[in-house]
């Protein structure tokens, strides 16, 4: 980070503070660096941010909760996991963001996700603050009863921090409708309140919203379609590679097919499956969601498809790449291969799946790059729509909700692009997203005083 004016000195100072205090949290430092670096031109233009301490305040969570989660497994043995909720910023609304259950979870990972969430939520245009939580609990191989007992124990501690106007969690990796159900059930039992707006991602019978399941994946594709259209292109007729095969990947793939693209490869932690003529996305969905299968099972059941054990899915040539698995899954080597194979657009369905080196490779090659905080904002935006329905005790139809989602994604696209244009870099969606999200939160923080 350069330091030739006060503004630039400020981002350097904020980053140095993070290195000193949080240098042992590499994912958080990476996420913060990426934002701070893009803010330099905005700080230069807006000296009002200089003395307000807004950067330092933004980089320090308002509250971090770490708690013990004891639960009993099916053999009767007591197990202990660690639970987290980072309430990062509530300038724009109640803390909002998902819960991740995965063995890789630690406070640094939750802080990176919570930090991203602040700007992502601001971009949706809805009144949502930023937060994130989760546990190092590994749902893999656990029985349904174990999952339920874990969720109940997790909520027994977390419930005191939540509320429709305080903090509203949802799902993320390892947390879907089943887990949200057990969490909501326990919250309801402890508080004796049917507070629908305390969690999102609920089932349709108990306050959930149409399109919430599909929203992150659909939204990512709506966003990429907008980026392509801004260049006079479209998804129709394009070869697309989607990494992952979880909630985001499945519905991104379905939307690609609906818009006339062909998804030729998808993956999981064991490897990837390719079908040059296009995967049957409903079969992938049924395999993963209904049968809990692996993508290699797909290759066994579909003779045209081939399973590649442990290889990099980014070796598969495509025009559009949608990383929808997890953080740092696409590095500079993979980016170089994608560019060599003619990729024209990237949309981050996952949170920070592209390493900083890979982002640079794409930008230098003129590839359209939609960063997660804009491209995958459809999930949390639809959570915001779920909150609206809960607050008005209403439920909307699928088509109406989907239209709202696609309009929100188009608005995010336009505001990000407009911001980037204002800084002389119309195709730099990273710069546009970071400055647009930051400006909204920072201006509000200035209005609310030093808190
Ligand atoms: N976990 C999702 C995200 O990364 C959704 C969060 C929410 O709906 O609150 O944005």
Image (tube, rainbow, N blue to C red):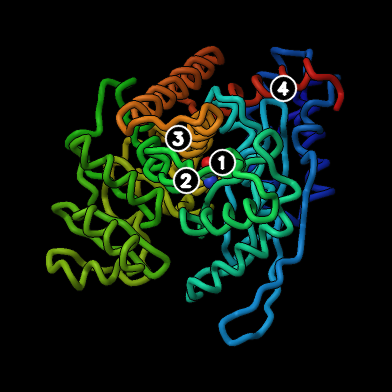
Label 2 neighbour load within 10 Å: few <14, some 14-19, many 20+: few
Q: Are marks 2 and 1 in contact (CB under 8 Å)?
A: yes
Disc 4 or disc 2, which is closer to the eye?
2
Disc 4 or disc 3, which is closer to the eye?
3
**How many angstroms separate mark 2 from mark 1 (CA)?**
8 Å
Q: Secondary structure at mark 2?
A: helix
Q: Secondary structure at mark 3?
A: helix
Disc assigned to residue 426: none
* Residue plotted at (34% across, 60% down): 289
Q: Quadrant of residue 104?
A: bottom right
**Residue 306 picture location, percent across and down:** 21, 67
**How many angstroms separate mark 4 from mark 3 (CA)?**
22 Å
Mark count:
4
Disc 3 or disc 2, which is closer to the eye?
2
Q: Is residue 108 above or below residue 56?
A: below
**Residue 37 picture location, percent across and down:** 66, 32
* Residue plotted at (83% across, 41% down): 17
For marks 1 and 3 on the same chain, the one whose residue lies earlier in the sequence: 1
Which residue is under mark 2?
Answer: 206
Q: Are marks 3 and 2 in contact (CB under 8 Å)?
A: no
**Residue 411 picture location, percent across and down:** 44, 20
**How many angstroms separate mark 1 from mark 3 (CA)?**
20 Å
Which residue is under mark 1?
Answer: 196
Which residue is under mark 4?
Answer: 442
For marks 3 and 2 on the same chain, the one whose residue lies earlier in the sequence: 2
For marks 2 and 1 on the same chain, the one whose residue lies earlier in the sequence: 1
Quadrant in the picture for the N terminus: top right
**Residue 392 picture location, percent across and down:** 52, 27
Report the front residue among 306 and 57: 57
Which residue is under mark 3?
Answer: 378
């Amino acid at each position: 980070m350069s330091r030739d004016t006060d503004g630039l000195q400020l981002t350097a100072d904020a980053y140095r503070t993070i290195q000193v205090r949080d240098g042992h949290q590499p994912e958080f430092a990476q996420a913060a660096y990426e934002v701070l670096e893009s803010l330099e031109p905005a700080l230069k233009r807006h000296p009002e941010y200089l003395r307000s301490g807004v950067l330092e305040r933004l980089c320090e969570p308002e509250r971090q909760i770490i708690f013990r989660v004891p639960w009993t497994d099916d053999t009767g043995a007591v197990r202990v996991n660690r639970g987290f909720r980072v309430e990062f910023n509530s300038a724009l609304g109640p803390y909002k963001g998902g819960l991740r259950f995965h063995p890789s979870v630690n406070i640094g990972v939750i802080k990176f996700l919570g930090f991203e969430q602040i700007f992502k939520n601001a971009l949706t245009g809805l009144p949502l603050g930023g937060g994130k939580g989760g546990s190092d609990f590994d749902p893999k191989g656990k029985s349904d009863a174990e999952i339920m007992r874990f969720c109940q124990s997790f909520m027994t501690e977390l419930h005191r921090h939540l509320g429709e106007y305080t903090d509203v969690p949802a799902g993320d990796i390892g947390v879907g409708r089943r887990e949200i159900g057990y969490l909501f059930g326990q919250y309801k039992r402890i508080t004796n309140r049917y507070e629908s707006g305390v969690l999102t991602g609920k089932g349709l019978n108990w306050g959930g919203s149409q399109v919430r399941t599909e929203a992150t994946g659909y939204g990512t594709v709506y966003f990429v379609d907008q980026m392509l259209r801004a260049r006079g292109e479209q998804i129709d007729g394009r070869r697309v590679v989607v990494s992952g095969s979880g909630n985001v990947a499945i519905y991104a793939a379905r939307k690609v097919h609906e818009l006339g693209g062909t998804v030729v490869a998808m993956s999981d932690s064991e490897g990837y499956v390719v079908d040059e003529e296009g995967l049957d996305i409903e079969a992938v969905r049924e395999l993963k969601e209904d049968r809990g299968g692996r993508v290699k099972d797909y290759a066994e059941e579909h003779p045209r498809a081939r399973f590649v054990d442990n290889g990099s899915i980014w070796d598969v040539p495509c025009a559009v790449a949608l990383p929808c698995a997890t953080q740092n899954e696409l590095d500079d080597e993979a980016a170089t291969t994608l560019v060599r194979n003619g990729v024209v657009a990237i949309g981050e369905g996952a949170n920070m799946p592209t390493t900083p080196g890979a982002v640079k490779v794409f930008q230098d090659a003129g590839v359209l790059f939609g960063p997660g905080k804009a491209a995958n904002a459809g999930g949390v935006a639809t959570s915001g729509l779920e909150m609206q329905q809960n607050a008005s005790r209403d439920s909307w139809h699928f088509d109406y909700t989907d239209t709202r989602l696609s309009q929100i994604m188009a608005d995010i696209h336009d505001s990000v692009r407009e911001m980037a244009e204002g800084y002389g870099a119309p195709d730099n969606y990273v710069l546009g997203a970071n400055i647009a999200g930051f400006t909204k939160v920072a201006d509000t923080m200035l209005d609310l005083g030093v808190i």
